[in-house]
Amino acid sequence: MDEQHFAKLVDAHADGLYRFALSMLHEEAAAEDAVQDAFEGLWRKRNRVDLAKTKSYLFTTVHNHCIDVIRRQRPHIAAETANLVASEAEPHDLQAHLHEGLASLPEKQQSMVLLRDYEGYSYAEIAAITESTLETVKVSIFRARRALRAYLGSIENVR
């Protein structure tokens, strides 16, 4: 892979990778770091990565980076969320409630739902990105959607 091909890959995938990372991490700087790390890793391994699989490689790298960040921050985030929920007086809007529901999902389910419903990837692509089987992806997305429906409850309760 030469510099021109690499630049085309950056142009083609940077926005999608950033949206995905931001959806998982909810912090612009952390999402930017995840994307930059993915492209940096691709450049370092440019002679070893199959050009036909660069998109999958990039999303897998960002996915793994986000999971690592979430796991490191989990105790801190849980305490912040508990304090925020306890101190909030105003009702949530639907989008904020949905983001809270997504954040309550296990990391793998969260990333699979984001890849499927936000980014529009096929089940096979998600399986490659998350290094899971096709059946695992389907079951995980089904369970995640069911959990989100239960979390959201009745739409009348969300204001």
Image: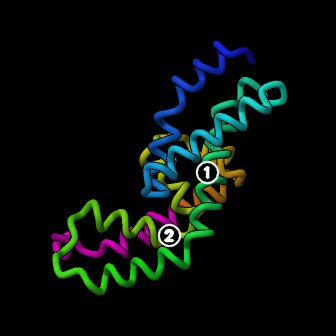
Image height check: is 111 above or below 48? below
Q: Quadrant of residue 6?
A: top right
- What residue sits 56% from the left and 70% below the top? 73
In this view, the residue in front, 140 or 62, is 62
Identified by mark 2, the residue type is Leu
Q: x%, y% of residue 34?
A: 58, 47
Tell me if mark 2 has few (under 14), some (14-19) or many (20+) residues whose alpha carbon lies within 10 angstroms of its own: some
In this view, the residue in front, 111 or 6, is 6
Q: Is residue 115 left or right of residue 100?
A: right
Q: x%, y% of residue 64?
A: 66, 53
- What residue sits 47% from the left and 49% below the top? 29
Q: Quadrant of residue 93?
A: bottom left
User: Is 157 one of the magenta-colored residues?
Assistant: yes
Q: Which residue is mark 1?
A: 63
Tell me if mark 1 has few (under 14), some (14-19) or many (20+) residues whose alpha carbon lies within 10 angstroms of its own: many
**Helix, strand or loop: magenta stretch:** helix
Over which residues does the magenta segment extend?
A: 142-159
Image height check: is 61 above or below 67? above
Q: Which residue is mark 2?
A: 105
Image height check: is 61 above or below 52? below
Identified by mark 1, the residue type is His
Identify the image quadrant of the N terminus: top right
- What residue sits 50% from the left and 48% below the top? 31
